[in-house]
Amino acid sequence: MTNSQAKTETIKIVIVEDFKLTRVGLRCALNANDDMDVVGESEDAIEGLKIIERAKPNVVLMDLGLPGMNGIEAMLKIREWSNDIKIIALTSHDREEEVIAALSSGANAYCLKDIDPQKLADVVRDVAQGVCWIDPVVAQMALNSLPKVENIGFLPNKIQSEGRIPLTEREFEVLKHLVTGKSNTEIAKELIVSVHTAKAHVCSILQKMCVNDRVQAAVKAVKEGMV
């Protein structure tokens, strides 16, 4: 299979959301995209897990405030038998502890329910390809709660001279956008480069920072005073 063929594959999605109106709206919005197919939906986590195990979707949209078993518990259950399924926590909750709990339980993304439908579609595409994404409002809130190292600049020459992470100037620009929760597509638009180039910069940053994903890179950048 070629890369072009892989990119056009349909993304299979399962929605777990207890409010029917929200669930129907999500289904209609996502199914409006030619590359997406909502293959199952549920109003509770117990039934949702059965659907997920049976349908084997690429992406799960998981509400956190579900009746009975909550979304955090459901994510942990999914991670017990699959690391391949990508999970998007889709919720109206923006409390720091819930963001951390969701990401620690296996969520690949954290979206607020007021997200624009087209933006949600972009997030689904990015997450399906392995990108971690956090709503910029939530990301900034969580990062603001972390202790910052004072009086440490982020110029490449200073960091290299101190033996710190040797990012290029362009990689520092990408890192600043990454910390605010921007996707590869958004970073590409900001820097006027291709999405492929933006993705290459992100991969290089992750490798140089010795982290596994964008969330870890963002946290490490703030803790070490790089942004």
Image (cartoon, helix red, strand yellow):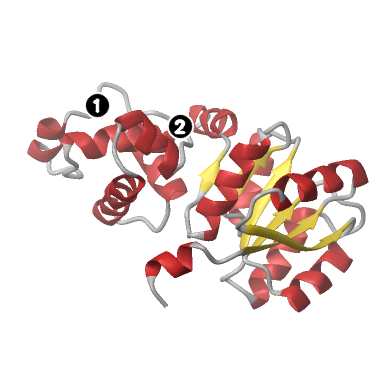
Query: Is disc 2 surrounded by few (<14), some (14 to 19) or many (20+) residues within 10 Å?
Result: some
Q: Is residue 54 above or below residue 134?
A: below
Q: CA distance from mark 2 to mark 1?
A: 19 Å
Which of the two residues, 226 or 130, is positioned nearer the viewer here? 130
Residue 43 in view here: yes
Residue lying at 24% horizontally and 40% vertically, measured from the top left: 171
Q: Residue at x 59, y 51 (%)?
A: 124
Task: Indicate the amino acid at tag 1.
Answer: Ile
Location of residue 78 in the rendering, given as x and y in whole percent from the top left corner: 69, 69
Say few, some or many: other residues with alpha carbon within 10 Å of mark 1 (under 14 / 14 to 19 / 20 or more). few
Give the residue at mark 2.
180
Residue 152: give its label.
1
Looking at the image, residue 46 sits to the left or right of residue 189; the answer is: right
**Residue 116 figure quarter:** top right
Rendered location of residue 9, percent (x, y): 55, 66
Question: Residue at 90% of width from left, 55% of height from top?
Answer: 43
Taking 35 as reference, is 172 above or below it? above
Furthest toward the top, the residue is: 151
User: On the image, which quarter does residue 36 sit in?
Assistant: bottom right
